[in-house]
């Protein structure tokens, strides 16, 4: 989520939706009576065609439907040549909308937290002898993907099938994943057998978690044991630490790097390739992040709950990798 414009005095925000998690968060944030404005299509008065225009609705209800958020209300402002009455915005990832209401301090706090929050999408594989369940876990919920099953004889039939085909099938499913993280769970050693078959790259982003059962019960058990929290947190810290390490390496060789107040001037010049900034400094310098990104730069929010974040804080909470040294 990006806060493109805000006016706390008048109760106004322009918001860009970046992913499905944002839609899920906004379903309860947008409330009855809010004024929501967005670009949409509406039938013209002659009834023969639709016109692309900006409408303002007084919200009556919202409905979250997987990859979109439906916002329905009565049109309060729009083009002169369109039908009035009720209309529904279908907000999706990539949509931009404006909202007006009497925002509370808690409302602003939520929006700021959501802007800084990193979305996650983690693949869980719960495996036991002859059976594997797959789930995608995101902030917006759990998706049941599929199941792999195969009869594997016991030890008394060791001269027959050994189960290698089953483990290969599971491996093939996992190797096709585009998720940043994988959690292998289960009550026995089968998860270890699958892990050992994975490529080195996939092993590096795989976490093993013991559970007493598989299926959805096992999934919830793994989450309760902290597997999801640990993987998501480690992923965030790893990403932030890599960015900090790149900055320190560049700084040490007196290369294209800067920190503190000079970064603001460099951003105005379009010289900032990657901005590293703590959440506190980001709140105090909200325009800096927008300026860098408008000029094609990237921003990494570096939290201070780990060593790399503490180092950036020692540099004033603002650092940058540059396109060039002025």
Image (spheres, rainbow, N blue to C red):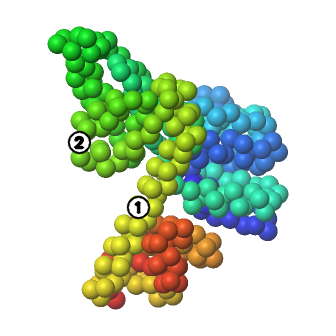
Towards the viewer: 283 or 54 = 283
Q: Is residue 293 visible?
A: no
Find the residue positioned furthest to the left.
159
What's the distance in space between the residues labelled 1 and 2, CA to CA?
A: 21 Å
Q: Which is in the foreground here, disc 1 or disc 2? A: 2
Mark 2 surroundings: few (<14), some (14-19) or many (≥20) residues within 10 A: few
Question: Residue at position x 47%, y 72% from top?
Answer: 307
Horizontal placement of 113 versus 215: left or right? right
- Using the rendered view, name the quadrant where residue 296 is placed: bottom left
Q: Is residue 209 visible?
A: yes
Rendered location of residue 240, percent (x, y)? 43, 65
Give the label on residue 230, or none.
none
Question: Residue at position x 23%, y 10% from top?
Answer: 157
- According to the image, label 1 marks what residue? 239
Question: Residue at position x 44%, y 72% from top?
Answer: 308
- Using the rendered view, name the quadrant where residue 285 is placed: bottom right
Towards the viewer: 268 or 164 = 164
Towards the viewer: 60 or 124 = 124
User: Element type at marker 2?
Assistant: loop
Q: Is residue 207 above or below residue 318?
A: above
For marks 1 and 2, the one nearer the N-term is: 2
Rendered location of residue 96, percent (x, y)? 58, 51
In the picture, the quarter occupied by the N terminus is: bottom right
The mark total stands at 2
Question: Residue at position x 49%, y 26% from top?
Answer: 213
Horizontal placement of 19 versus 79: left or right? left
- According to the image, label 2 marks what residue? 199
Rendered location of residue 148, percent (x, y)? 36, 20
In the picture, the quarter occupied by the C terminus is: bottom left
User: Element type at marker 1?
Assistant: helix
């Amino acid at each position: 989520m990006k806060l493109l414009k805000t006016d706390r005095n008048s109760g106004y925000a322009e918001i860009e939706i970046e992913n499905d998690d944002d839609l899920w968060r906004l379903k309860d944030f947008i409330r009855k009576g809010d004024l929501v404005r967005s670009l949409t299509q509406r039938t013209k008065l002659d009834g023969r065609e639709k016109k692309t225009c900006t409408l303002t609705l007084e919200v009556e209800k919202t409905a979250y439907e997987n990859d979109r958020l439906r916002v329905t209300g009565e049109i309060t402002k729009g083009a002169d040549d369109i039908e009035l009455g009720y209309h529904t915005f279908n907000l999706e990832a990539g949509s931009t909308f404006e909202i007006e209401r009497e925002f509370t301090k808690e409302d602003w706090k939520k929006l700021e937290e959501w802007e800084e929050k990193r979305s996650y999408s983690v693949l869980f594989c719960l495996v036991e002898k002859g059976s594997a369940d797959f789930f995608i876990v995101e902030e917006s919920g759990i998706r049941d993907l599929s199941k792999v099953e195969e009869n594997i004889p016991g030890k008394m039939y060791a001269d027959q099938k050994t189960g290698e085909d089953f483990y290969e099938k599971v491996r093939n499913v996992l190797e096709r994943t585009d998720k940043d993280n994988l959690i292998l769970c289960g009550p026995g050693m089968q998860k270890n057998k699958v892990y050992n078959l994975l490529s080195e790259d996939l092993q590096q982003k795989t976490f093993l978690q013991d559970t007493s059962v598989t299926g959805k019960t096992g999934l919830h058990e793994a989450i309760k044991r902290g597997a999801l929290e640990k993987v998501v947190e480690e992923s965030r810290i790893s990403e932030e630490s890599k960015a900090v390490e790149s900055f320190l390496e560049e700084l040490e060789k007196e290369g294209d790097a800067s920190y503190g107040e000079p970064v603001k001037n460099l951003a105005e010049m379009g010289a900032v390739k990657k901005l590293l900034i703590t959440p506190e400094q980001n709140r105090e310098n909200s325009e800096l992040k927008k300026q860098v990104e408008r000029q094609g730069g990237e921003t990494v929010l570096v939290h201070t709950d780990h060593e790399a974040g503490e180092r950036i804080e020692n540099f004033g909470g603002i650092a940058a990798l540059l396109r060039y040294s002025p």
